[in-house]
Image (tube, coloured by chain):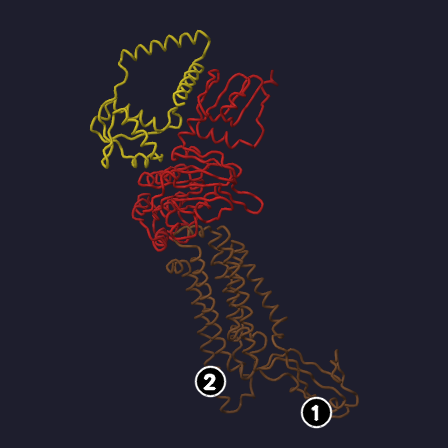
Chain colours: A brown, B red, C yellow
Amino acid sequence: MTWLIWRQHRVQLLLSAAAVIGLAIPVWITGTHLATTLHDCRTASTCGSFDLLQHYGAIRVIVNLTIIVPVLVGVFWGATIAGRELEMGTASLVWTQSITRRRWVAIKLGTLFAFAIACSGAVSALVTWWSNPANSTVESRFDGPQFDIQNIAPVGYAIFAAALGLASGVAWRRVMPAVATTIAAFIGTRLLIELGVRTHYMSPVVRITGMKGPGSGPPNGSLSISTDLTLHGQVVNGPVRPLQSCVAAGSRDEMNACMARAGYSFRNVYQPANRYWTFQWIEFGIFAALAAVLVAVAVLVLRRRDA
Amino acid sequence: MTSPDRAAGAIVADGLGKRYGAKWALRDCSFAIPQGRVCGLVGANGAGKTTLLRMLSGLSRPTTGRAEVAGQTPRDAVEYLGEIGYLAQDVPLYRRWSVTDHLRMGAHLNPRWEDTAGRERLRALRIPLEQKVGTLSGGQRAQVALALALAKQPHVLMLDEPVAALDPLARRGFLSTLSEAVADGELTVILSSHLVADLERVCDHVIVLSDAQTLLADDLDDVLATHRLLTGPRRDTAAIERDHTVLRIEKTHRQVSMWVQLHGPLHDPNWHVEELGLEEIMLAYLGLGSAAPVEPELSEAAR
Amino acid sequence: MITFHLTAHSNLPPYLQIVEQVRQALLAGVLRPGDRLPTVKEVVGSLAINPNTVLKAYRDLEREGLVEGRQGVGTFVTRRPDGPSPSDQAALRRALATWVAKAQRAGLADGDIESMVRSVLVSTADEGVA
């Protein structure tokens, strides 16, 4: 059976390995540079004076593009691993050799998830390592796409995408519709969780700040949910014109102080930076659980339904 | 070697049925094929041939009844799968693999694997063993698939329309290989086909399915010996219908033709009796139930 | 060694075609006592027919005493078949000719006569079986 898996998937395996190595080389080279630059500017205390990532535009695009790695795993591995065998009829060839369907399913699943974890884990490790300098200065690893491409969340996505591909392949018994279903359902689920659910994993922290200019946002490294201007605790909607009396105050600081005295303040709603790992694990857990459900359905269908 | 009970038959079906949703693909199918027989499975498309073979191979579970193949209940177990060879419709193979790859797969997945004879035969047929099977002709692919199935050294071989897509020469070649394998040992074969002339050559047992029902399951010699075409001037056919099974009847005002399964000697010497080939017998069976007996009135209209 | 041929248009079932071909070969002297018949596997492989058909033909020939199967070695010719004596054959032929002439006088065409003969053969065979 090991021979069968190797013979069947060796091209896929080698291409995937080549892709990961192809990504690792530029990431490694630029990442080392980036770390040196950060180290140098820290020694010279000049880090605040320039944009750390200013010369890393292209590689940054590539690093951010690793957000699609889970979909690739779902499409090229998940959707084909059982779907192609069902489509070509070779499933009935293998299932009538002296090997049980149970064992075949188990080994195919093992291969699929070992690959999904290895592939997305390797990419995520590279991206996480590369992003370290940026995390400490410019960007929040808790925010937006950075959360999705670092540490264990992307591994959860890859497991989910693989399971989704497997289940669609088993349901459709054909590769192309399974690929389309995988892409659509993966993007749909990811958007739903990211935009509608993730911020609610824990009740957010609410912080009222004064009328200071740049300091009125949420703290560094946190996941910002909203930043609103309030008047006596009520959110002010629409454009706010500074009070006529405060405009007369002169300097910007004095104007802000004047506004604060009039009852204006900023309200930040956010998830603080120390919850980052909790959120990574919750995100991973949700996608792993969804994957488990899909795998259970796929296995049930494969074992129960006629080939 | 676990040799199945000769008396019970190598392939036995007992009330076997399969339902997909509300539709029965096969109903109450019972027969016993003795060991060493080559059984032809005949029926129109959708009659249930593939369903029956899939249940016998263990790929599909029966809704009702049970089957016994080589002394075991078909199921997803190594002990069972090792006893059978199965060739699905359209001859599925890994198109990008070479013949050798397939043989190696077989060797890895089957404990009782012997492909020396198969390799020799494929070489004798000038089939390139190192070429991707996707580039081989239909006849060559069928030979490769048959070699794979035989190398498992099965006791029972099930073939679903193996020659349907082949030209006459390739068909003859395939059936030669199959017949030689049967001559070699204790192999029992069940194969479905639309090509009755082929079946008449290679088979010695037939099962006729129509509309999910089993119409006939018997040794070919008995089938040929008991089916006759009776023709004669029009008269009362009640006596024949009482003693024998009339499969099909055609009447004009003057003449009656009957395709009959005889259950004993025919006492009335006034009937003109003709032997029937398997093809005509099949047609008589498969025409059953499709329409009411025809009464062609052409000759009368011309009068 | 001889090779067998089957034709779909023959009125004889395949096993009888083989039996007939062996008899013809024996009568013609193509096969002689001591010769080995092709093995079942050889016949089956060249004709793509059921092995039991060949076995049945060989058993028939064995019953007639024309051949003898030796376990693990093959099937060997033992003697020439004896047909009806030439005089008997001539007598039968004369009787048939008389009957055919009578049928023709009654207005039956050649085809009618053939089909009548075949029908009688089939129904006597059935009576014999049953």
Q: Which mark is residue B256?
A: none
Task: For mark 1, name the chain.
Answer: A
Q: Position of residue B122 (x, y in %)?
A: 33, 45
In the rendered view, tell whether residue C112 sits above or below residue A242: above
Residue at 56% across, 82% down: A274
Is residue B9 or residue A51 the one in the foreground?
B9
The furthest residue to the left: C34
- Secondary structure beneath dot 1 equals helix
In the rendered image, which residue does mark 2 sit on? Answer: A36
Is residue A4 positioned above or below C102 on the image?
A: below
Q: Quadrant of the N terminus of chain C?
A: top left
Residue that carries the numbered disc 1 in the rendered image: A253
Of mark 1 and mark 2, the one earlier in the sequence is 2
Quick one: label 2, few (<14), some, or many (20+) residues within 10 Å? Answer: few
Residue C104 placement, left or right of C58: right
- In the foreground, A157 or B294: B294
Whether the residues at callouts 1 and 2 have beta carbons within 8 Å, the answer is: no
Confirm whether circles 1 and 2 share one chain. yes
